[in-house]
Image (cartoon, grey):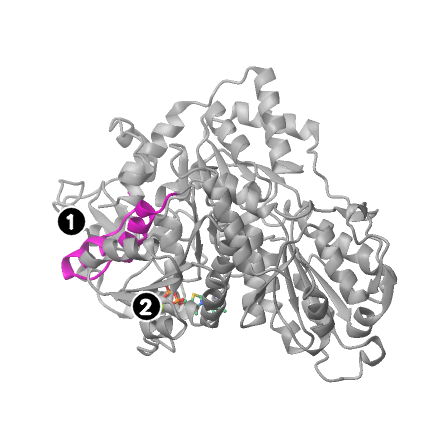
Amino acid sequence: MSDINDTKAAAGATAAEGKSAPQARRNAATQGAPRGAGSRTAKQGRAMLGAEAVIASLEAEGVTTVFGYPGGQAIKLYDALYDSDQITHVLARHEQGAVHMADGYARSTGRAGVAIVTSGPGATNTVTGIATAYMDSVPLVIITGQVGRGVIGTDSFQESDIVGITMPVVKHSYLLQSTEELTRTIREAFHIAVTGRPGPVLIDIPSDVAGETMVFEYPDTVNLPSYKPTYRGNAKQIRAACRLLEEAEQPLLYVGGGVIASEATEEIVALMDKMHIPAVATLMGKGGVPASHPLNLGPVGMHGAKYSNMAMTEADLIIAAGARFSDRVTGRVSEFAPNAKIVHIDIDPAEIGKIRDADVPIVGDLKGVLSGMLETLDKDGAVPCDDQWIADINAWRARYPFYHPNMAENEQTGEIVPELVIAELGRQLDPATSIVTTEVGQHQMWAHQFLPREFPRTFLSSGGLGTMGFGFPAAIGAAVANPGATVVCIAGDGSFQMNSQEMATAAINGVPVKVMILDNRCLGMVHQWQKLFYDKRYSQTLLEPVPDFVKLAEAYGWEGERVEAPGEVAAAIERMLAAEGPYLLDVAISPEQNVYPMVAPGAALDNVMGAIDVAVGAVRTDVPAAPGSPRAQAAASAAPVAASPCAKLDAQFGGRWEIDPEDTGARLGQDGSTVDVRPEDWKTLFREADAEMPAFSDEKGGAR
Ligand SMILES: Cc1ncc(C[n+]2csc(CCOP(=O)(O)OP(=O)(O)O)c2C)c(N)n1
Ligand SMILES: [Mg+2]
């Protein structure tokens, strides 16, 4: 077993050779024997223990790094690992941490992440990590030690039915019955994890199987007649999709995590450029379309830009590219994209029609399907779509810029504004050489909104499961996989405490990961919902002012620092990024900050609150309650509507509106006159405005 620092030294040499960072990343990811080296490994044909064969199999798969935690039923595996020259083991401090590390490794490289743990509590500790990977289609191979075959089912010490427990959250799993099936099982597990729609595969290995002698024969090929993912999209369907696109006047690409899994960025951008189609990206698709592309509208959904949500609502054709119509994106499904035909491209047939029927379903690998579409469009001599649509979207972008009054207000009160902290981090990071992970909560959404990412696999966040405690260990995994990269975890104070024990892992292994905590001393996202929807009844969301994160950092041998004033932020981020080792930056922010814009849960996607409306000089700060709901009843008996600062706007558009203190320009309705801006007038009103498409950095990264 090699030391992790050897890997670092090797990567340093790569960087010194002057290769670009993404290339260095790829090199780091593919070091070691090629995947599926199979019979070409030197160990082929040798007699060895089952445990040794497990390690030899991992070597044959080209594995160079595993994450894990030993125990009684995994001791034989760890004994075999002791002799491996190829595999570096990163000892986590909790099995959940180990799985998230393997996940960060996988998301940042595209290769399967590997974790090894023991039976019973070791195995059950992996469940959240496995479910997290499953929800986001991340390839993992999880190896769990199990009690001996003879005592399975007897409640023997540290026995748990981990195959049963994880059944709904794995792509596939195995309970190894004999050494005869050992190598074939591991070969299959890697194949299943990375092919088709990627996902986690679990192999449960009884300790007596690990202790048996066998002859190591690693198969080159996999024979799984009932598992044959469809890669090549149906040519007829591809033509049908192109036809719809050629006819569409208001097409939109809705880009999800599939663009990253399929490595289809080039094709997506080519399609955008060729047909002048704007794109919105989900949290999972972030980085899959360069932030700087002028047709990338960025975040969509619950905390997306109002103009992105409007584009979804107004589109006449939506091409869902590796996206799954998550409720965080669609809002109320019955009102989602009412005028749009749907082309749904996904490698997993189960996704098609699950939430929204597709007019043209295409099962296949996104990259190939998009290439097919590009070819067909070329042959057809397709002309780009009408630029009026882009002009309309530009007008919405000008009317609803991606900032809100919180940001200005807090600048005035001398508090640190979280959005601006993220934007500053974005300015200081080189997008080509940095990877950012997030925890889960408000900070995650601010990162989604305000951190520009140019490359796939450089933004890692738990989207589907929303797992607090994911981001920090995932950052360690990504840093181990990409030794030349700057890896920053944007964390919340609540989430970070869920796996802060992994500070030891980073310290001991010399992983120079950076953690920037947006420290609001509360479970901010839940607090925000309580503020907006539960009458400020802050039940169990305020965190006590412990720990002192800087002292915690010092306890683990990290450097750490806390900032409390806006003027200190930029220099502190500079110090964090310049630090050689792991570094924790604790940024004090107010618990009163909200993530805006926001679509209330269950509301229609274009029913956006907290998005500034430049046209009427006001911001909608609350959506109307559903008729008959408890909130509507409470509102009826509460303050009269006249108390609203923009009562006329309230009456016209619904909800509560407030004037933006910073927006002093003359606006419709601001003088108290009757406002009559109907949604259908938006286009004509702003077509004349001749709005320029603002560059991403001006608009979001450099807001204000
Ligand atoms: C493991 C887990 N438990 C509970 C939740 C529910 N939850 C979502 S966001 C959130 C608050 C997160 O707080 P923090 O990490 O401080 O981030 P903030 O929202 O304050 O930025 C909670 C409790 C979750 N997503 N994951
Ligand atoms: Mg918090």
* Residue 459 versus residue 690 in the image, above or below: below
Q: Is residue 406 magenta?
A: yes
Q: Find residue 531 and name its label.
A: 2
Residue shown at the point (77%, 49%) measured from the top left: 41
Q: Is residue 594 visible?
A: yes
Name the residue nearer the viewer: 107 or 364: 107
Instruction: Label 1: state its secondary structure.
Output: loop
Q: Is residue 375 magenta?
A: no
Q: Give x and y (percent) for residue 54.
A: 75, 61
Per the rendered image, the range of residues in magenta is 401-430
Name the residue nearer the viewer: 552 or 217: 217
Q: Give x and y (percent) for residue 345.
A: 61, 38
Residue 484 lies left or right of residue 535; in this view the side is right
Q: Main secondary structure of the magenta part?
A: helix
Q: Amino acid at mark 1?
A: Glu
Instruction: Please report whichever mark, 1 or 2, sits nearer to the chain's N-terminal start.
Output: 2
Instruction: Label 2: state its secondary structure.
Output: helix
Residue shown at the point (21%, 58%) measured from the top left: 568
Asked whether the residues under the numbered discs 1 and 2 touch, taking CB atoms below 8 Å apart as contact, a structural biologist would say: no
Q: Amino acid at mark 2?
A: Lys
Q: Which image quadrant shows ligand 1?
A: bottom left
The residue that disc 1 covers is 662
Residue shown at the point (71%, 51%) measured from the top left: 61
Question: How many residues crowd mark 2 within 10 Å: few (<14), some (14–19), many (20+)?
Answer: some
Residue 641 lies left or right of residue 382; in this view the side is left
Measure the C-alpha gap from mark 1 to mark 2: 24 Å
Residue 379 lies left or right of residue 468; in this view the side is right
Name the residue nearer the viewer: 541 or 552: 552
* Residue 528 versus residue 311 in the image, above or below: below
Quarter-wise, where is residue 116 in the image? bottom right
Q: Quarter of the image for the N terminus: give it.
A: bottom right
